[in-house]
Image (spheres, rainbow, N blue to C red):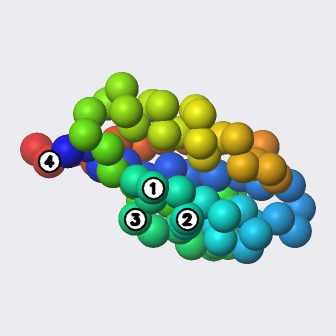
Amino acid sequence: MVQAYILIQTEVGKAATVATEISAIPGVTQAEDVTGPYDVIVRAEARNVDELGKLVVAQIQGVEGITRTLTCPIVHI
């Protein structure tokens, strides 16, 4: 299982709507609108890195109002 945080920038005023829509996507375990340089922080999981990439590119980035994403895989060292 691969887990990651996905940091999202949105259009002005869209953070709450984007977080709500993303939280319904399978594989997303949490989506919160926040303050700071990013507007939404998502925690997601997938079976492998390829599936995580598909989740981000095909589903999360397709949500209207998103301008940029940054995916940060979780590592256990």
* Labels 1, 3: front one: 1
User: Considering depth in this image, is 8 or 22 the residue closer to the camera?
Assistant: 22
Q: Circle 1 is placed at which residue position?
A: 26
* Labels 4, 2: front one: 2
Q: Which of marks 4 and 3 is nearer the N terminus?
A: 3
In the figure, residue 73 lies in which quadrant?
A: top left
* Labels 1, 4: front one: 1
Q: Earlier in the sequence, mark 1 or mark 4?
A: 1
Q: Where is residue 70 in the image (x, y as percent from the top left)?
A: 56, 41
Q: Which of marks 3 and 2 is nearer the N terminus?
A: 2
Mark 2 is on which residue type?
Ala
- CA distance separating discs 1 and 3: 8 Å
Q: Circle 3 is placed at which residue position?
A: 29
With respect to residue 56, does 34 lie above or below?
below
Residue 60 visible in the displayed image: yes
Direction from residue 41 to residue 49 in the image, left or right:
left
Mark 1 is on which residue type?
Pro
Q: Earlier in the sequence, mark 4 or mark 2?
A: 2
